[in-house]
Image (cartoon, rainbow, N blue to C red):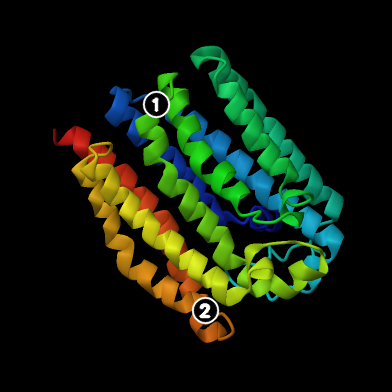
Amino acid sequence: MLKIWFLETRPQFLLLSVILAFLGTSMAWFYQNVLNWGYALLAGFGLVLTHISVNTLNDYFDDQSGIDRHTQRTPFSGGSGVLPAEQLKPRQVFWMGAITLLMATPIGLFFIIVQGWLLLPLLIVAALCVILYTPFILKHHWPEWSPGLGLGLLPVLGTYFALTGAYSMPVLLAAVPSFILVHNLLLLNEFPDVAADRMAGRKTLPITLGKARTAAVYSTLTVIVYLWIVGCVAARIAPVWTLIALLTLPAAVSAMRGSFKSDDMTVFIPAMGANVLVVLGTQFLLGLGYMLAVILS
């Protein structure tokens, strides 16, 4: 039973939250010379709890709409498969999502008390992204902005604030790739779910734009990520060491090529895997670059 509960969290995706916390921590060390591993670990734990809430609530609402019984499941999309297999009851999954979100709340309150109330608006927006994503946001055009914001940019800024008690424009600009990368993570994973999502009245970009144009959007945004990283270094917003994130470019090229062949799953599934590597690897290498800039300075 414990294994089933664990699988329901979709553990293969939770590494994203760990890497986002690592990136925010690295930025805090580079920009403010603040490195508090206790706070970093606590913030990271809060992110993981929130991410579990996102995954489980998404599974619950997908089950209620019947989508998961019509999706073409892949290693990267289509939900956990726990509810369609009737390994857990829907109410159990709902309460798992609700409880993990409630468990993350005291962590947010702790950092508000310790570092300042300016963290509160960020946490409210992030919570709304979690709660409203499946039942509301997905039914409006361009819903991919929500995970890009709530599971990309805001976690980096939130971790940074949890350690430093401040925001800054350089950090905001440096966190933009996280927004785009997580946006693209969801975007490519939506391709196999087009038929099921359309039945549920969702308006993801592959539905509203079509797969070919969405692949062009995905590829353009992927290129922008790398140009943005180079631009931040050129503008001296980020250290030269962050250019090691360009090492994921070959995987990005593979993902971009595969995005235009979504009807051939023998090509598209490896492209989805390459996309995951780009999302996780690029942000990890960015964080490593910030740390190397401090260590080697």
Q: Residue at x 55, y 67 (%)?
A: 188
Along the horizontal axis of the image, is 36 left or right of 8? left
Quadrant for residue 222, please give it: bottom left
Q: Position of residue 103 (x, y in %)?
A: 67, 31
**Residue lying at 34% horizontally and 50% vertically, measured from the top left:** 228
Q: From what the image shows, is residue 143 above or below residue 26?
A: below
147 w.r.t. 158: above or below: below
In the image: residue 177, left or right of residue 119 = left
The residue pinned by badge 2 equals 268
Report which quarter residue 126 is drawn in. top right
Residue 141: x and y, percent? Answer: 69, 56
- x%, y% of residue 178? 45, 47
Q: Which numbered tag is attached to residue 168? A: 1
Q: Nearer the viewer, residue 21 or 153?
A: 153
Q: Secondary structure beneath disc 1?
A: loop
Q: Quadrant of the C terminus?
A: top left
Dot 1: within a 10 Å radius of its alpha carbon, few (fewer than 14), some, or many (20 or more) residues? few
Label 2: element kind: helix
